[in-house]
Image (tube, coloured by chain):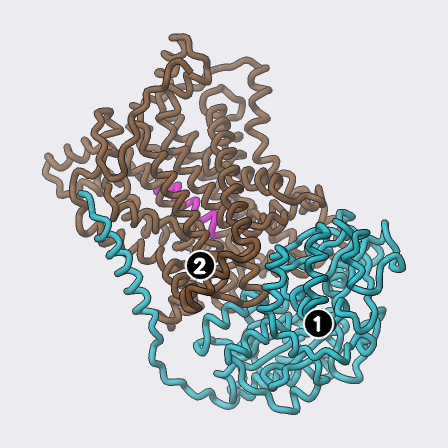
Chain colours: A brown, B cyan
Amino acid sequence: MTVAPERARPTTAGVPDARTAPAASSRAGGRGRPPLGLLAAALVAAAAAAIPLVYLLVRATESGLATIITTLSRGRVLEYAANSLGLAAATTATALVLGTAVAFVLTRMRVPFARTWLLISALPLAVPSYLAGYGWLVVIPGLNGFVPSWLLLTAVTVPYVTLPVAAALRGASGDLEGVARTLGRGPMRAFLVATWPSVRPAAIAGSLLVALYALSDFGLVAMMRFPTLTWGINAAYSASFDRAQAATLALLLVVLALVVVAGERAARRQLPRAAARAVAPRTVGRGMLLSMLPVVAVAPLIGVGVPLLGLLSRLLEAATLREIDVPRLLEAVGSTVGVAVAAALLAVLLALPIAALAARYRGRLVTAIESVGYLGHALPGIVVGLSLVFFSLAVVPALYQSIAVLVFAYAVLFMPKAIGTMRAGLGDVPPRLVSVARTLGMSPLQAWWRVTVPLALPSVGIGALLVAIATMKELPATLLLRPTGVQTLATELWNRTVVFEFGAAAPYAALLVLVAAVPAVILSGVRSSAKEEL
Amino acid sequence: MRVSAPLSLTALAATGLLLAGCAAPVDSEQPTEPAADGAFTLYSGRDEELVQPLIDQFEAETGIEVEVRYGNTAELGALLLEEGDATPADVFLSQDAGALGALSQAGLFTTLPADVTDAVPAGFTSTDGSWVGVTGRARVVVFDGERLTADQLPDDIDDYVDPEWNGRVGVAPSNASFQSFVTALRVLDGEDDAAEWVSALAGNSPQIFEGNSAILTAVDEGVLEVGLINHYYWYGLAAEAGEENMRAQLKFLEAGDAGSIVNVTGAGILNGAATDADALEFVRYLVSLEAQTYFVEQTFEYPLLPGVDAPAGLPSLESLINPELDLSDLDDLATTQQLLADAGLI
């Protein structure tokens, strides 16, 4: 490498970074004291997100330090941890590269049916990981171990990168890239120098979601027989009902997640964002196009196509085809959509103060609040579910096993999906506009409501949609916390697959994917960046 | 503004304390349950498809309303431990004896009347009357019927760790029923033999699975030759796929072998429902002729009530019963887990 990309020095944690690029200055917070109201709201949200952590500490420590050490030094715990971390790292790296490539193809090249392709590339989000694993096992029964876990996890998580990067690319400065090309850089180098900096925050925020998803996933690794920490946690609950042991392993998972979150923060800070200018897609040759489209198709094929085919073949094979209970199916659809909408709203409300704080201010407290906000996403659903059982029985026993507590649990679990995108969206709003509004006599709150909110709204929408999709697919916390008798598509699906009624399960699986695909499709069309509006 | 580390730590700690403070047990006066209000809540670790018809039958006969919460036995067990005395559940129907033992040890069950616990043979129920066994499930060897025949398979679990089976056997060491089997091995053959068996297994490149159904599916798909599971999983899959289409076949080990122990599913009444006549009536119903027949016909499990025939095609329960083994001897799970951990299996 002869010419290094223009790279700002990595900044020391907590020290404001004084740079002059407009977008950069918008993120260079730490200048003011966060408004007390915002800080208080963010603390409340962080307290909600910390419930599982408190629960785990209580459960892990009640048996004493000796037991904790025994658990951690036990046979395969280190191997489990290494497997978790390795899987998360590999999945994240692949999703980052593939997602960025797909987004690049779909936004920078004149692809026939570009809109449809983008929509297709969002579909893997709608497939629960356990369903993807199951579908593949039907097609290739012997699959197991690291490689299939890695590839499948990548396939179902890659839209977390593709969608925000595509949105950012549509607003990024392609002309700079053209300049770099005319100065003799190859396309790859030109992309890295000119375009990558402007999509990097979006790509990194998406990668964080991928990494946390990979750490917390249980369904897929169980199917693929790849023992990770979530496997150990589940075994502790199911074989010995040893909550202390399970909590200790879950705390280890929390530590890994905090490492990931810290890594994301370090990566996010290194580069300034470039000025924005929309750029039109370029026409490319047919050969180029034909070689690029497989890149776009690979994740939907692995994550959606093959699993659904596998499920379909099981449906056709099934000797006992029961009649579909339509009212029951519709009821499950109704409750699934209902809790998903409620969870999305609540998660966005909780994530908003944390995102606003993280977008504009720095400091250890802000860092701590933001990190805690991400915790739920790194923990398996059963841990968050049990922690909410513990919490609601102690604090609001009257609400125990009510929809309210269930929705709250979803918000704790999936709040992180909203924090990242909303932080990026809020950070993109030029502070100058807010200053102008202030000089025109608006109060800070008015300025925020009239200027920041409208500009950041698309990113709020993305966060809400991501939460809604995740909620629809969630199983373990739903099993624990739902009101007795309430069924979602995921619980109905589970009900049938545990007794091998694949024929009866198939309609529920198909509907689950279909229902979750609706927000995924909307998501593929949302323009994430406020810059596009400017 | 930079907030100092101590301050942020204090804030976090304060948050924790706040939550922990909230979590302090609320002083609640225990309302005494009415003796019979015609309704109770059941936590069912058995699946809805299998159990709901039986519950419908019970409701129709008695007029008692059953509110059922379905879930996985392990998760419901953990849930009940977490809920403690605040649980809305009156009865727990569990898929395995391990969960019942854990809840019984935590003191969550009330003692059942003798006429209920005496309905089933002593080896298949709790020793202290805290829960009652409802059906039996035998440990079996499942094998690929296209590559092997039943007589090519050893009759003794010890032979399955011979070098000849290297890499060919699937197990689920983190699964409760596997751990019960290893515990039985310890009780029947002694600690040394059990440790030897476990380390021989570990050294024999076993295929590790998460649970019984994953093993069964792998055998049925022809990607695994032999696996250790519970018998009724096979019947569940056969009911869906058609018995004639099953590639996987079952082999029962020699009577008295630890590899063929019969474990149970069972039910207990939670403390809060100690005086709830409806809950008791349901548990009594589970060990009645009617319910036992239902389990035989619908879930292919062994009835525990004397005089009810085992499912067709299965060896009789009497031929599997191990007179030297009492299920309540299987409660020392910790040593078993240590054994498995030392061998690197969990």
Quadrant into which the N terminus of chain B falls: top left
Image location of residue A170, percent across then percent down: 39, 26
- Tell me where the magenta segment starts and ends, as one range: A460-471
Q: In the picture, residue B156 is in which quadrant?
A: bottom right
Label 2 packing within 10 angstroms: few (<14), some (14-19), many (20+) = many
Q: Which residue is mark 1?
A: B190
Instruction: Give the residue type at disc 2.
Output: Val
Quadrant into which the C terminus of chain B falls: bottom right
User: Magenta stretch containing residue A469, yes or no?
Assistant: yes
Q: Is residue B37 left or right of residue B263?
A: left
Image location of residue B32, percent across then percent down: 44, 88
Label 1 packing within 10 angstroms: few (<14), some (14-19), many (20+) = few
User: Magenta stretch containing residue A352, yes or no?
Assistant: no
Q: Is residue B217 left or right of residue A260?
A: right
Image location of residue A183, percent across then percent down: 38, 8
Q: Is residue B288 left or right of residue A112?
A: right
Instruction: Give the residue type at disc 1.
Output: Gly
Up-down relation of residue A374 to residue B185 (above or below): above
Q: Which residue is mark 2?
A: A384
Q: In the picture, residue B310 is in which quadrant?
A: bottom right
